[in-house]
Amino acid sequence: MPANILNLSSYTVSQITEDEHDYHIATTVTRHPLKCSHCQSENIRGFGRREQLVKDLPMHGKRVGIYVDTRRYQCQSCNKTFYEPLPDVDEKRKMTKRLVEWIGKQAITRTFTSIADEVGIVEGTVRSIFRDYINELEKTVRFEIPQWMGIDEIHLIKPRCVVSNIKNNTIVEILKDRNKPTVTRYLSQLKGLDQVHYVAIDMWKPYRDAVETVIPDAQIVIDKFHVVRMANDGLERVRKSLREQLTPKQRRGLMHDRFVLLKRERDLTDK
Ligand SMILES: [Zn+2]
């Protein structure tokens, strides 16, 4: 029997079966308990068993279910019964601890449903693990005030303000919307605002107003991307209005005129 397939020495594998989608791995806990979990007496005896399903990391593209043949004990001293504890398992979630950890990390970059499908659990469980994982991360992560601050927007259901650190290429915060009061309130509670030298924004006026109010010493820079895009839009409008005044014959002569305009200067020929 390939006892090491799980790479978990706390379990002894007794049987492995598989079908198209799943591995079923039958196991027992390797080390039996020596003491009563209620009174610590060593005077315990077996009192039946039950099978517990524990989900584990997907393996070879299949879902993995560990079926633990768990022993139940009765204490001869206090008369209470108890099941042997499952090592390396998050008993609340009926999963190995390494699976919980893996789901938390995967959920940063993948959809919850794709993870739920791959592991064979419901999406709500992925969501709850992700929430716990993020809460843990937030306890340890501290952001530095950006010397070069970026204020832009992202569309998540509605437009929201995104604050970034342009020097480090990191996102600092996403706000609930991009209104001036929200941005002003956020900027006002930051510590070390005198460290902010430049703030790059798009052409959204509330951003400029908020920065001018809260960080008056910082230099505001309009992100080139937005300027170039507006210039391109302007040129496109002029081109279209000129086209409308042309005769059909002239228009045919100017077929692909848009591509001529888009070409780099060095790639243009007289023709
Ligand atoms: Zn006891």
Image: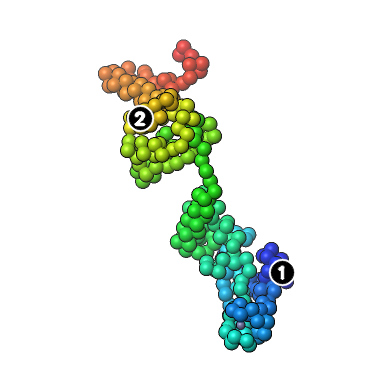
* Residue 3, disc: 1
Amino acid carrying label 2: it is Thr
Q: CA distance from mark 2 to mark 1?
A: 67 Å
| Res 67 → quadrant | bottom right
- What residue is disc 2 on? 213
- Tell me the SS state at disc 1: loop
How many residues crowd mark 1 within 10 Å: few (<14), some (14–19), many (20+)? some
Q: Residue at x 59, y 67 (%)?
A: 89
Residue at (56% x, 60% y) in the render? 100
Say left or right for 176 vs 86: left
Name above or below for residue 158 compared with residue 198: below
Q: Where does the image place residue 215, in percent across and percent down from the top left?
A: 40, 29
**Could you tell me which residue is drawn at 45 percent across and 61 percent down?**
124
Q: Quadrant of the C terminus?
A: top left
The extreme top residue here reads 270
Say whether mark 1 is within 8 Å of ligand 1. no
| Mark 2 Cα-neighbour bin, 10 Å: few <14, some 14–19, many ≥20 | few
Q: Position of residue 142 (x, y in %)?
A: 52, 43
For label 2, the SS is helix
